[in-house]
Image (spheres, coloured by chain):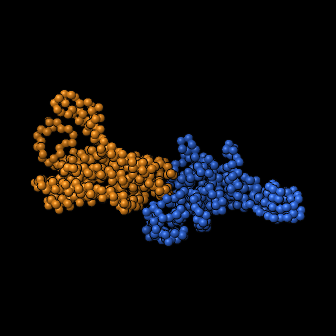
Amino acid sequence: MRREGSPFQGLSTVFVKELADHVSSIRMLMLELLIVFTALAALYEAISSLRQTTAEDPFLLLRLFTTDQAPLPSFVAILGFLIPLMAIGLGFDAVNGEHSRRTLSRILAQPIYRDALLMGKFLAALATIGISLAALWLLVIGLGLLFLGVPPGGEEIARSLVFLVVAIFYAGVWLSLAMLLSTVFRSAATAALVSLGIWLFLTVLWPMLAPAVAQLIAPSDPRYALLGLNDPATAVWTQELLRLSPNDLFGEAMLAVLSPTTRTLGPVFLDQLRGAVIGAPLPFGESIMIAWPQTVGLVAGTIILFAFSYVLFQRQEVRA
Amino acid sequence: MTEQQSETRNERRDLVISARGLTRRYGRTVVVDAVDFGIARGEVFGLLGPNGAGKTTTILMMLGLTEISSGEVSVLGFDPARQPLKVKRRVGYLPDAVGFYDQLTAAENLAYTAKLMGLARAERAGRIEAALARVGLAEVAAKPVATFSRGMRQRLGLAEIIVKRAEIAILDEPTSGLDPQATQEFLGLIGELKAEGVTVLLSSHMLDQVQRVCDRVALFRAGRIELMGAVPELAVKVLGAGFVVEVEAEGAGIARRLALIPGVTKVETLADDRFRMTAERDVRPDAARAVVAVDGALRKLSVDEPSLEAIYAHCFQAQPAGDVRHAA
């Protein structure tokens, strides 16, 4: 049984309306203020520490993203923590909000398919996040120019642009998750609580739990412990488990792209380092290669979670 | 009966909605159980029944908003399951307790749906303005919907159907929760739609209102249509007769005398001086003559129009659930 007509009919209308709603909403304003202020604080610390240390670093601009000065984490780490919050904030009431406002059946009685509504909402929220992140990115570049006084090189710009793209997909994962939960739960409060719970679990608890779970799966060999070394099997398991969290994927990808000296993201064996010049930056393409699997993981997570909410939403009853 | 004739003629000619064996099951529960009905162009058709009888589900199936388990329905010649966009472009729907985006104004809300309808920019503004004026919301067009009362929201929902220039307007419980004046206004608007040739499908459990505006009604009970037809017809079918005349008069032997009037099927004595007659026609003149003939003092003579309420009560209370299946 095939349905007639395009599933994208009305997509642009929904997109424009949702985008306008997001951009003008107080919720979005608060989220933006939160991110801008914490990011500025991190940047300020990074700038003041960079000014004291070095002017010879070829990737001075990228240092802005990654330098952390206690007690503040780096700009990228702060974003890794706050982007999910922003995405959840925009997505947690996407579908159940329409239910509780009782607008869903009225909108779906217009000549559009449900596809357009869900996709329009997703793309609008993603675009909102994209616009905010792009603004933040420009802010960083501008502040870097202003306070460090060193013009950024082409490669630095390219790498920081990759940061922007990966950050948007990272937001996409959380947005898809929030929208999925907004489809599953009829109450927006429940959806918000569950998304925030998952967010806290994956960003705060999982990094602590993963090594413990890895120990259970692959107990470390006491002979390694005697030598004061980590068992590679346990280390590999720990990393694989950590990678279940999008937060970790984002962190790893950013490490590879923004710190050009990063050669690998996993445990390193001595024989792999043979011939390597420690501390020499990798070319742009090589760094991308290192970050590629993580980026693909984030994209795949976004698509899979979105597909789940899509299927659920298609089968959901319209009436409350 | 003329209504019956015109109805059968309509059914053959210009059916805008026709359902055959339309069924919706959720797991094992049958919510809509093989209903058949046809609605002619320009008709006001009422779906009646208690909550949970399957009215809204039937409506949603007609719009392609919920799956059809078996059977078929055709709306303006299209299959809502396969051609939902064509159906939804021509059919307006006002859901039960309709909602709007509270932060947007009335005009903005309509502009959004008008865009979804695919109306050209030039056309939108004019249509929205006209529709808002028609439902009496022109002055509040620029106010956020958050400030609107229930009645205003319902009228805004109707304005949306007017903007769409729908051939069929499906209104789900449009007057529930409205105050009497708002209800009156709303029924007036429905009358206007009918006058323009719009087919109106109305679901409600406000019986007197339905009776006032509907040409024909279908009574739903547990997913089935129990009865369908024009109200006077149903009265004859269910209550046995169309007219109930109440007489209040003093005098001897009035009841016996009243029973002799041709066309009277039953005379009940409610009190010493009050009698209720059931008749096939309006027998008031004969009743008055009868009272005068026995030298009685006539105090009151009233006729109950065949009431939907009586039919409804008869249908849903008098009959045990088991043997109602063949009533329709």
Q: Is residue B62 above or below residue B125?
A: above
Image location (x, y in percent) of residue B133: 52, 71
The residue closer to the viewer here, B96 or B295, is B295
In the rendered image of this protein, which colour is used for chain B?
A: blue
Q: Residue at x 25, y 47 (%)?
A: A251
- The quadrant of the picture occupied by the N terminus of chain B is bottom right
The residue closer to the viewer here, B319 or B269, is B269
**Residue B171 sits in quarter:** bottom right
Image location (x, y in percent) of residue A19: 37, 60
Q: Residue at x 29, y 46 (%)?
A: A247
Image location (x, y in percent) of residue A233: 23, 33
Q: Is residue B215 visible?
A: no
A205 left or right, relative to B150: left
Q: Residue at x 42, y 50 (%)?
A: A189
Image location (x, y in percent) of residue B126: 48, 71
In the rendered image of this protein, which colour is used for chain A?
A: orange
The residue closer to the viewer here, B287 or A117, is B287
Q: How many marks?
A: 0
A179 left or right, relative to A243: right
A25 left or right, relative to B189: left
Q: Residue at x 62, y 47 (%)?
A: B222
Q: Is residue B163 visible?
A: yes
